[in-house]
Structures are given as structure tokens and as C-alpha cells.
Image (spheres, rainbow, N blue to C red):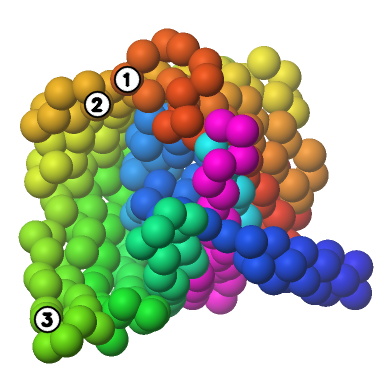
Amino acid sequence: MKRIFVMIFMLLLSVAIFANVVDEINDPSAYSKAMAGAIYALYTGPQSIAYNPAGMANGKSSIFFSHIEHFLGVIRSEFLSGSFKFKNFYGGGAIQYTHPTDQFGYDQYKLTGSVAYKMGENAVGMSLNGWFGSDIKSGISMDFGSIIKYGKLNLAAVVKNAFASITWASSPSTTQTYTPELIVGGSYFGKKYTLNTYLNFTSGELGFGTEISVTSFLSLLGGYRMTFYKTLSKEVSVGMRMRYPSLNIVIAYVFENSLKFGDLLNPFYVSLTYNFSGGI
């Protein structure tokens, strides 16, 4: 009964915050941002829906919520997802909302449904994404992912935005297709740390991240990300993860292009995960 009340509280809190959501959510997890996006080879529960659907299979039923606050609160974003375990199968879903504050005002929604199957310490998963909004008549895409474990090493292979197309609500309406993204990732598990990396072959994006355990309840996070195809696209990120039985809170800050404060493009992230199965 207590868990049901917690779930209802989190859902009501999320609905209240969704009333003031702005900006697009491409990388909604503070845990991911703190490690430069390198979580594709990790089992991170419902936040994995935005990265590698196989990562849902972490042995728990969870709800994930993320808040993104750009410097001085100019831009805010929210992301809500959940996953539920049934034997070796996992089901999940996510919602994101986009609404910029500039003169190009529009409303966009992205809904995702995901499934995953875990075989021992290996897993596969897939997601179906749909878009709609004031400027979108319809949109659809699919994501596929896998995680394979070799001793202390996890390897991941992900295809995102497969069969992706969006029909825009223009006059006349136009349909735009997108190139699938091929992503590989890896994670190495040390005694009190993990080393993580990923490479997006389509966008030319490369990221490295680490998590260092300080105590059983606190970890420090850091990462570095760059894009080969663009100039001024380097990121340095820092963060921390606080763990309490059934609850994870992650805070991250990203320095985009240079190590300086005060840039309106430097976002502040907060993520929260509640595990109904217990544990940390």
C-alpha cells in the first residue's frame, strides 16, 4: 500500500510540473549527462528507454523522472518513464513534451512503448516511438538495443530512429525521413568504479564517463563528450548520485564548449528514480 501511495504522489507531481515544460528533450537523464552520455551498456531501468531499451532489464520495477534546468531557469524540461518486470520480460513507457519559449511557439509530444527480455546477464529490447503536436500530423520510429556481458565488461549495440519519418502539419503537409543511428557502447566494472564509453557512428559523437563510489550511498560522476563532425561541440560534465533504499537522485552540470559558468547553454540536470522492487 505504501508503494502505491508513493507511485500516485510521483505521478501527480509530474503532472503538475508538466504544465510548465519547455525545450526539447534529447538526452533526458542526469545520470547520462554527468557521464557524457555513456550509459548505453548499463542496466539503468526506465531511463534506458531514451538510450538502449535493453537497459530496462535491471531486475526492478521503477519510475524515472528527470528535470532539466538551463542556467537561470531560461529553459526547463521534464521526462517521465516507467518499467515493470514480469519474470524475464520487461515492459515500459515514456512521455516527453517540447515547447520552446521563443517566437517559434509549438507543442510537440513524444510517446514511447518499450519491451525487453533478459537472458542471464544479457538482454535485448525494442521501442516504438510516436510523435504528435501542433506542428506534427504524425511521426513514428523504432529503436533496437542489446547488452552482452563478458566478465567485468558490458558491450552494447543500439540502432535508434529506424524507419523514422515525421509528417509535418504544413500547407501542404510534408513528410521527412531520418537516417538510423548506429551506436556501440562499453562499460568496465572495477571494484569501486565503472568506466563507460560510447560511439555514435551516424552523428560522429564520442563520449567517455566514469562513476566512482565514495560510500555505499554516494558516487561521483564525470565525463567528456565530443563530436567529430562539428567544431565547438566539446562537453565536460560533472555530477553525483545519491542512493537510498529504493531511491536514486542524480544531479549533473554540463560545461558546453568551454569551462565557464554563466553561459545560457549550460544545462543543470536533476533525475530521480524510485524502485518498487527495493534495493539500490
Q: Nearer the viewer, mark 3 or mark 1?
A: 3
Q: Are marks 3 and 2 in contact (CB under 8 Å)?
A: no
Q: Nearer the viewer, residue 226 or 222?
A: 226
The residue wearing badge 3 is 174
Q: Residues within 10 Å of mark 3 (few under 14, many from 20)?
A: few
Circle 2: element type: loop
State the residue at coordinates (87%, 71%). Answer: 5
Mark 1: amino acid: Asn
Quadrant in the rendering for residue 12: bottom right
- The residues tagged by marks 3 and 2 sit, at their Cα atoms, a distance apart of 30 Å
**Is 274 on the left or on the right of 136, as rendered?**
right
- Distance between mark 3 and mark 1 Cα atoms: 35 Å
Task: Return the residue at label 1.
Answer: 257
Q: Residue at x 11, y 81 (%)?
A: 174
> Mark 3 or 2 closer to N-term?
3
Quarter placement of the N terminus: bottom right
Q: Tell me the kind of residue under disc 3.
A: Thr
**Front position among marks 3 and 2:** 3
Q: Mark 2 or mark 1, which has the lower sequence index?
A: 2
Q: Amino acid at mark 2?
A: Ser
Q: In the image, which residues are magenta? A: 71-95
Which dot marks residue 233?
2
Q: Position of residue 15 (x, y in %)?
A: 69, 70
Label 1 packing within 10 angstroms: few (<14), some (14-19), many (20+): some
Determine whether, in the image, residue 181 is placed left or right of residue 214.
left
Label 2–label 1 contact, CB within 8 A: yes
Identify the mark at residue 68; answer none if there is no mark: none
